[in-house]
Image: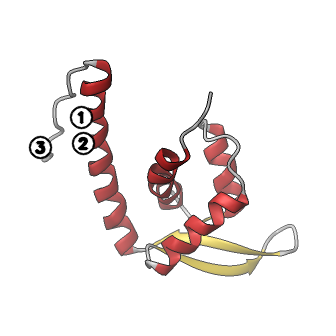
Amino acid sequence: MMRDTQLMKGILEGCILGIIAKGETYGYEILAQLDAVGFQDLGEGTLYPVLTRLNKKEYIYCRKAKSPLGPIRKYYTITVPGKAYLEDFKQNYRDITASADQVLFGSTPAPARKGEKRA
């Protein structure tokens, strides 16, 4: 199946941030988790520019440390602004996919969760 790279770019940042939000991690581990849920064929050339962008926006913090296997590794953690951005991303993702599902599949949107508002 052909994947739309523009569509992928739009959600990849939020998915990567979601993985980092679960706990400190490093690049190879992020790629493995993405692959495990179906984001196959992503490489370092896709991942590291996203990590750099998230770091520049101060949504993640990067530290370098020696790994248990020897070489220096970059470890990533989410910041407070990153957590806020991730929550906004998730809400926007829910809203957009609910609207797209209605148009593309004729499905009825799921009821809003407590405290959520629908457009």
| Marks 2 and 3 close (CB-CB < 8 Å) | yes
Residue 58 image point, x, y percent = 44, 79
> In this orientation, which residue lies closer to the viewer: 26 or 97?
97
Residue flagged by tag 3: what amino acid is it? Ala
Alpha-carbon distance for marks 3 and 1? 9 Å
| Marks 1 and 2 close (CB-CB < 8 Å) | yes
> In this orientation, which residue lies closer to the viewer: 69 or 73?
73
Residue at screen point 48% across, 58% down: 13
Residue position marked by numbered label 2 in the rendering = 95
As drawn, is 23 to the left or to the right of 46? Answer: left
**Is 78 drawn above or below residue 15 in the view shown?**
below
> In this orientation, which residue lies closer to the viewer: 63 or 117?
117
Indicate which disc, 3 or 1, sits on the residue closer to the N terminus. Answer: 1
| Marks 3 and 1 close (CB-CB < 8 Å) | yes
As drawn, is 77 to the left or to the right of 40? Answer: left
Judge the density around disc 2: few (<14), some (14-19), many (≥20) Cα neighbours within 10 Å: some
Residue position marked by numbered label 3 in the rendering = 119
Residue position marked by numbered label 1 in the rendering = 99
Classify residue 43 by image quadrant: bottom right
Residue at screen point 32% across, 24% down: 104
Judge the density around disc 3: few (<14), some (14-19), many (≥20) Cα neighbours within 10 Å: few
Residue at disc 2, secondary structure: helix
Residue at screen point 69% across, 74% down: 74
